[in-house]
Image: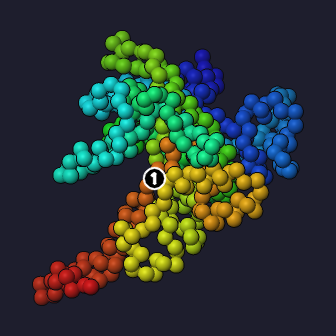
Amino acid sequence: MALTIRTVERRLGLDSGDLIITYTLCPLCGHLYHPNYIANADSSACQNNDCNGVLYDINQLASGEIKRVSRLTCPYASIIAWLRRLLKQPGICELTQNEQAEGDQGFAQPIPPEQWVAELNMDEPLVDISDGHGWDSGAARLERVVDEQTGNVEDRSLEDPPIWFSSLPYRFSFTLSSDWFQPTREGNYSVGACYISLNNLPRHLRFLRENICLILVTPGPKEPNDYTLDQMLGPLIEELLELNQGVEMNVRQGGDGDAAIYEDQIVYGQLSQHIADLIACIKLGGAAGLRSELNFCLYCRARLSLLSVPARYIREDLPYRDPDEDLNNAYYWRSLETSEERRAFFEFSGNRFTALHRLPGWHTSTCSPPDAMHLLYLGGMNWILNKTLFQPGMLNKRLATDEDPVNRFNRMP
């Protein structure tokens, strides 16, 4: 008979011990420590240079057992363990492979942008992420290296010739979403959450609770600084690098019960985009803040003071950022030795290195699309409803002799 909650969870298949790892953070500098280090450490002092932080306290339980209790923790859910669980569920493999079975024919080389545009039907809308050029242009098994001769950062394929990522039999595209919020109505305690969704699933299933993975919860009471955030993202980046080269997993195929077939397959994965509000995109992507005169925008190099000029809103005239230049700037920023040099270069270029820059194919300006929820639904639509419909009285109760609302709307400048 089960006597503890842990035993009940294990017998019901609900044990998350293989999925969630609770790391320890230094309360002062934010350095990350694996639980194995905490269990075997000789001292509770932080090992980071010039840091006097204490990692854990030693408590004695009623049974006499000595237990080490971390002062600040950060839970992380392994994306590889989550994917292993997901691929053992009935129907998931078939749902994620439908798109490939309909259009892909074995291994193929990435499609250049010119070919994608030439084959695009302008009369049909792009309804899903798989309809975009990025779905067909990415190469598999990329490795991000710094050229010793030129100093430029390059993504090189380990396959010759390069193989189209979407043509691999078991490949998955991930979306990382992040946000910070206040869990209580009172106080000023801020908690962050990052979760992963699977772009290969159909749209109506992609964001169901059972199909997403809450990979990271950042502790409060304040938002983490740049160093701490990179430390917390470290385990995720390491696993994404493993998935980029391929990880062997047991995959379920076929029907229910005895008809199901379990096979070991090499599974690939890559992070395609980061969906968040502008502040979170800036924080995770290593861009400058909204008050920067030279680099306030994540996507172009327009000056902040020129926003008062109507001509600066013409899209064709905007000086768009070069993703390769931003990437080289981020790696150059990391190579600088002093904080003064890094601060000066960051103010000039608007680029700094983050954990995401380790991922092959990642570029902050192209992998962080504008946030539709805040810009369109909570921004543009909210302004239209209030300024155009409610405040002018377009929806007020009226008599038959009152002015027609359509005529009133047409007179607006």
Residue lying at the far front of the rendered structure = 149
At label 1, the amino acid type is: Thr
Q: Position of residue 174 (x, y in %)?
A: 46, 40
In the rendered image of this protein, does residue 331 appear above or below residue 101? below
Q: Residue at x 52, y 74 (%)?
A: 304
Q: Position of residue 182 (x, y in %)?
A: 58, 58
Residue lying at the far top of the rendered structure = 258
The residue indicated by pointer 1 is 366
| Quarter containing the N terminus | top right
Q: Residue at x 54, y 55 (%)?
A: 325
Answer with left or right where residue 100 lies relative to residue 88: left
Answer with left or right where residue 313 lies relative to residue 224: left
- Which of the two residues, 95 or 219, is positioned nearer the viewer here? 95
In the rendered image of this protein, does residue 354 appear above or below residue 267? below
* Residue 76 in view (yes/no): no
Q: Position of residue 342 (x, y in %)?
A: 70, 59
Answer with left or right where residue 166 lies relative to residue 103: right
In the rendered image of this protein, does residue 175 appear above or below residue 90? below
In the rendered image of this protein, does residue 310 appear above or below residue 100? below
Q: Residue at x 37, y 64 (%)?
A: 376
Q: Residue at x 46, y 81 (%)?
A: 308
- Which of the two residues, 208 or 240, is positioned nearer the viewer here? 240
Q: Quadrant of residue 290?
A: bottom right
Neighbourhood count class around disc 1 (C-alpha, 10 Å): few under 14, some 14–19, many 20 upward? some
